């Protein structure tokens, strides 16, 4: 089954890969079949264990074979066209993450397989998903959100296989990736809108410590302090009754809908009585209430840049640009 020509210019590990691929194409190996062991191939062809292991790891990363503890290696998939497998871990799925994902997928080659997972801001879920998939992928793209100590899990994966997405915590600064500078972005955006903001009596940030970046809070408080503005941080809108003269900065869409509903219930007029600045622009925010002002990064651009980084195996950190879009709500 394994054919090795030592005079051939092709690396020996690659000849092992080609041999197994050929056996699958010819039907000699089918899904579920066991392949010769590392020791068997090593001894029959007088190879080092590392050479055989490199070949097996490549096939494993591409999802063609799998290892079963105590039993050996088995054919997992007969699709040998998959040349690379990418692990993509998001925090949650929403419309702008869909834009990021679509742009990322559309820039990749057809023979690259991307498997997407979600940790939903739960560290144990994050830990279990990663640990269950270590060694099964060529590259790992991780959206750590604001989870703490994610570096303790990621250090189990080779550094050159990991890319960080969206947030770049201090303990992950050694990894390449594409991120938003939340502290700088919110400060600069509020500063650009200062001529509209100063008309309001009070700024309120709706901030969830479980889901929102710490930099967003820091940038908001710094802006209010520098401009000597009255401000408040709310963890929930459940019992909050909006008042005339308040400006709400709202990172998530659920609370955006809540404040609009409360505004209507209390017969307040958007822009005149209260202001709203939302995060992450969508088509819906262009339309709702005549348009909602947003602070937003370009998620499609983030996805395209990520694909280019992964395809070319670039080791760099890119700060994704951020924009303020002023509409009727301010």
Image (cartoon, rainbow, N blue to C red):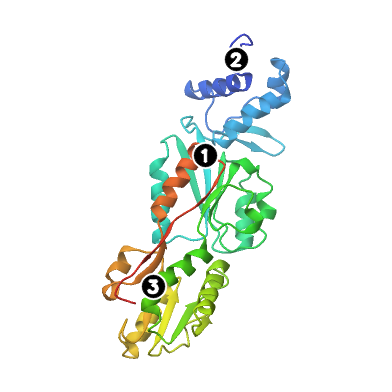
Q: Horizontal and vertical percent for residue 291?
A: 29, 72
Numbered badge on residue 85? 1
Numbered badge on residue 119? none
Picture residue at 57% right of the left edge, 70% below the top: 210
Quadrant of the rendered structure where residue 200 is?
bottom left
Asked if residue 249 is positioned above or below residue 319 in the image, the reply reads below
Picture residue at 57% right of the left edge, 68% below the top: 214
Q: Which of 124 and 313 is in front in this view?
A: 313
Circle 3 residues within 10 Å: few <14, some 14–19, many ≥20: some
Residue assigned mark 2: 3
Mark 2–mark 1 Cα distance, whole angstroms, equals 26 Å
Contact between marks 3 and 1 (CB within 8 A): the answer is no
**Does residue 37 appear in the picture of this structure?**
no
Residue assigned mark 3: 193
For numbered disc 1, what is the local secondary structure? strand
State which mark lies toward you, 3 or 1: 3
Q: Which of 38 and 251 is in front in this view?
A: 251
Asked if residue 52 is positioned above or below residue 105 in the image, the reply reads above
Mark 3–mark 2 Cα distance, whole angstroms, equals 68 Å
Quadrant of the rendered structure where residue 58 is?
top right
Q: Horizontal and vertical percent for residue 293?
A: 35, 71
Mark 3–mark 1 Cα distance, whole angstroms, equals 44 Å
């Amino acid at each position: 089954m394994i054919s090795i020509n030592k005079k051939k210019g092709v690396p020996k590990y690659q000849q092992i890969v080609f041999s197994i691929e050929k056996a699958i194409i010819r039907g000699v190996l089918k899904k579920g079949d066991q392949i010769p062991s590392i020791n068997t191939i090593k001894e029959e062809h007088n190879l080092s264990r590392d050479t055989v292991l490199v070949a097996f790891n490549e096939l494993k990363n591409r999802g063609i074979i799998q290892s079963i503890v105590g039993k050996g290696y088995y054919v997992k998939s007969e699709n040998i066209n998959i040349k690379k497998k990418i692990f993509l871990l998001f925090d949650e799925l929403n419309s702008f993450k869909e834009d990021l994902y679509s742009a990322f997928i559309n820039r990749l080659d057809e023979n690259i397989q991307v498997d997407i997972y979600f940790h939903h801001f739960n560290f144990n879920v994050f830990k279990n998903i990663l640990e269950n998939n270590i060694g099964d992928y060529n590259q790992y793209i991780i959206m750590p959100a604001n989870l703490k100590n994610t570096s303790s899990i990621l250090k189990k994966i080779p550094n050159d296989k990991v890319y960080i997405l969206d947030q770049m915590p201090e303990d992950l600064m050694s990894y390449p990736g594409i991120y938003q500078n939340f502290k700088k972005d919110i400060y600069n955006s509020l500063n650009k809108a200062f001529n509209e903001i100063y008309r309001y009596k009070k700024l309120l940030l709706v901030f969830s410590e479980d889901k929102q970046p710490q930099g967003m809070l820091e940038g908001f408080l710094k802006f209010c302090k520098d401009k000597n503005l009255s401000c408040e941080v709310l963890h929930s809108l459940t019992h909050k009754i909006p008042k005339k003269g308040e400006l709400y900065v709202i990172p998530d869409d659920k609370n955006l809908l809540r404040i609009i509903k409360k505004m209507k219930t209390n017969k307040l007029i958007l822009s005149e009585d209260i202001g709203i600045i939302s995060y992450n622009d969508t088509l819906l925010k262009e339309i709702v209430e005549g348009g909602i002002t947003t602070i937003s990064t370009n998620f499609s651009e983030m996805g395209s840049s990520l694909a280019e980084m992964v395809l070319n195996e670039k080791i760099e950190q890119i700060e994704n640009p951020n924009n303020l879009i002023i509409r009727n709500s301010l």
